[in-house]
Image (cartoon, rainbow, N blue to C red):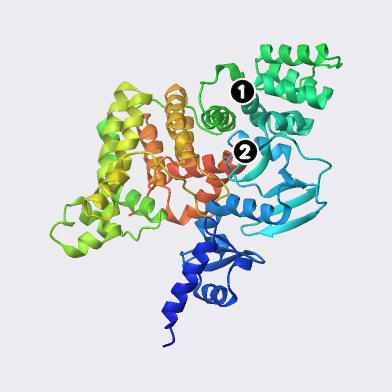
Amino acid sequence: MAKAAHELLADALEAASKVSVDHVVNSAQLGKQHKTRLIKAGFLKPIIRGWYLLDADLSAEDTGDSVLWHECYWTFVAQYLSHHLGEDYIVSAEQSLDIHTGNNQLPAQLLIGNTAKQNRIIKLPRSLDLSLFSAQSLPAEVAYHAGVRLYSLEGALVRVGPTYYRRQPQEVALALKSANPTALLAQLLASGNQQSAGRLAGASRAFNQPTLADELLSGMRTAGFEVSEANPFESPVPDISVLRPGSPHAARIELLWETLREQLIPLVRPPTNPPADIDTALRALEERYVHDAYHSLSIEGYRVTPALIERVRQGDWDPEGNEADKQQRDAMAARGYRNAHLLVKEAIVRMSSEGVGATALKSDVSAWFRALFGPMVQSGMLNPVDLAGYRNRPVFIRGSRHTPLPSDSLLDAMETLFLLIERESNPLVAAMLGHFFIGYIHPFPDGNGRCARFLMNALLVAAGYPWVIVRLETRPEYMAALEALSIDQQAEPFAQLILEAMDYRWEN
């Protein structure tokens, strides 16, 4: 008896899953009929000719629309390069250094040096490219990122040119902070690169690392090389000796905070004094609650109406006794938002009298996350373990080239963030950057956008500013502004959007 269509499709899915590597499929390993069925059903989405993404998200029309594509980007690159070039390739020194220092954005064009003399550009989804160029030689020592061959940290430092120092001093700072001095000197001695030694010594001294500078100069000169120290930077650079010990991701947040702060200070208004009567501020906040909840939840894709929000606030939503309510994900999101909002108000009261403290703020944000998803856990839609805290798996942002921090760096990164907020003297800067960095780090499995807006508004209201409602109709501009912050380190679009929303008054 011939198999039914659904059985044939199941066979095709099983065959594809056996040959896929983390959802990436080389079609040469898949039968033609299986491939045809899966493409027609929407399960196979093309990456480039002969390579597909095995994706169960049938709502994504093509590969670029799928969150899975960003998750699988490095897997695809590793598989493709291994298939076509074996081990005869290396990611450029500049981009190797970006990866080593925790620069998580997907490169618009990944530069691949190779000894196979392949020179071509390969177009990928989401306007990403692979650019293959001929390389005279490959390094003896390599590092790996998700299976992709890189220069070692020290090898990349020795090979990057002067333009990289001027364009990306933050990456150089993080690399020098993490580099092994012995390995760095060994790379310089092996290459005999006197210009690079002079730049590295000058950069080390500029970053207040005089011991490293002297060691590099002494080692090279003792070996007979004539090295002239030169500061490769055009502008003053930070003192990296004061950075807290920790992951390069946490150090990056410290440096990026200062960079963005310098952009924000000329844009924001002088700080105001906290309200004399915090109860007045809370009443105004409560009056606008329905509008805030509607827009904040709608931005995240929930189909929430003001009527539903009001019903939840009045206690008319009953997931225990009403089966329709129990199954309504949107209503549970509204209930969670209300629970979290009440906790945010408590935090505002405390901060208005006691100030902002890193330890308390850390507890607050985690409590808001748990409150947002408590109703879903109670209804059985989520596992109680999902409320444990920071995520323990990768997460990706649809439509963004920014990849949130790896899970093993979250504790360090979040502690750094809360300390930066505590130390910040301008509450508008603290609020805006607090919002941005929650999204940049993405500490939770879900709810990061809502927690980011809660944090921003708690800091604003406690300091005497109005609660900001980011309206649904401004979502494209809002997401674009956050992307400009993450990818281009441009703070002005986000600052202007928040300042405009701060002056906005909802008209009933």
In the rendered structure, the answer to whether residue 184 lies left or right of residue 241 reads: right
Disc 1 target residue: 177
Task: Mark yes or no: residue 61 visible.
Answer: no
Q: Position of residue 228 (x, y in %)?
A: 83, 16
Q: Residue at x 78, y 32 (%)?
A: 161
Q: Is residue 49 above or below residue 473?
A: below
In the rendered structure, the answer to whether residue 303 lies left or right of residue 497 reads: left
Disc 2 target residue: 99
Q: Residues within 10 Å of mark 1 (few under 14, many from 20)?
A: many
**Local SS, label 1:** helix
> How many numbered marks are there?
2
Would you say the residues marked 2 and 1 are in contact, meaning their CB atoms lie under 8 Å apart? no
Q: Earlier in the sequence, mark 2 or mark 1?
A: 2
Task: Mark yes or no: residue 179 visible.
Answer: yes
Q: Residue at x 63, y 50 (%)?
A: 78
User: Most extreme residue toward the bottom, as rendered?
Assistant: 1
